[in-house]
């Protein structure tokens, strides 16, 4: 009986780990929004997230058109959050970029 339980727990753990890995590798606006509020983004060494300085995207309304947006994101991550530069090919940076590109500001 103990062996059956141990196998069931092991299979469940592997399943949830696989789901977590597949979500982490998925590029999406929703994932970018989640990362934007993550105080642990890129190993942040303080209690800040992107949204700490840019609540609801304030100040980023025109950033989506910036051809150097990835570099700008990484500068904030390293300077303001005290984190590590995010690989420019990663799902994290692509998702953050996609989310920031949706922040066009209030309709006029």
Image: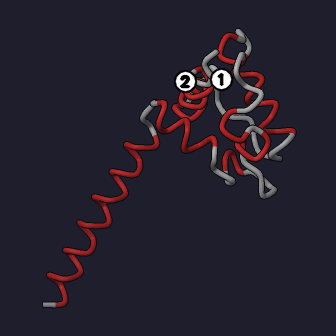
Label 2 and label 1: CA atoms lie apart by 15 Å
Left or right, 102 with reference to 15: right
Q: Which sits in the foreground, 1 or 24?
A: 24
- Farthest residue, direction front: 108
Residue 35 x %, y %: 59, 43
Residue 25 x %, y %: 44, 37
Residue 52 x %, y %: 76, 47
Q: Which sits in the foreground, 60 or 97?
A: 60
- The answer to whether residue 54 is above or below residue 102 is below
- The answer to whether residue 64 is above or below residue 85 is above
Mark 2 / mark 1, whichever is N-terminal: 2
| Numbered label tally | 2
Q: Which residue is mark 2?
A: 98
Q: How would you rate the neighbour count of disc 2 (Cα within 10 Å): few for under 14, some for 14-19, many for 20 or more?
A: some
Q: Residue at x 46, y 30 (%)?
A: 27
- Colour scheme: secondary structure
Left or right, 47 with reference to 89: right
Q: How would you rate the neighbour count of disc 1 (Cα within 10 Å): few for under 14, some for 14-19, many for 20 or more?
A: few
Query: For residue 34, which quarter of the picture?
Result: top right
User: What secondary structure is found at the residue carrying circle 1?
Assistant: loop
- Farthest residue, direction bottom: 1
Left or right, 36 with reference to 84: left
The answer to whether mark 2 and mark 1 are in CB contact below 8 A is no
Q: Which residue is mark 1?
A: 105
User: What secondary structure is found at the residue carrying circle 2?
Assistant: helix
Q: Residue at x 74, y 35 (%)?
A: 85
Q: Residue at x 67, y 47 (%)?
A: 41
């Amino acid at each position: 009986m103990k062996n059956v339980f141990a196998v069931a727990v092991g299979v469940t753990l592997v399943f949830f780990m696989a789901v977590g890995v597949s979500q982490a590798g998925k590029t999406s606006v929703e994932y970018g929004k989640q990362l934007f509020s993550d105080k642990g983004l890129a190993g942040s060494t303080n209690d800040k997230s992107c949204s700490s300085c840019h609540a609801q995207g304030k100040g980023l309304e025109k950033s989506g058109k910036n051809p150097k947006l990835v570099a700008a994101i990484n500068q904030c991550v390293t300077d303001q959050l005290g984190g590590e530069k995010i690989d420019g090919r990663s799902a994290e940076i692509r998702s953050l970029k996609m989310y920031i590109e949706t922040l066009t500001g209030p309709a006029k």
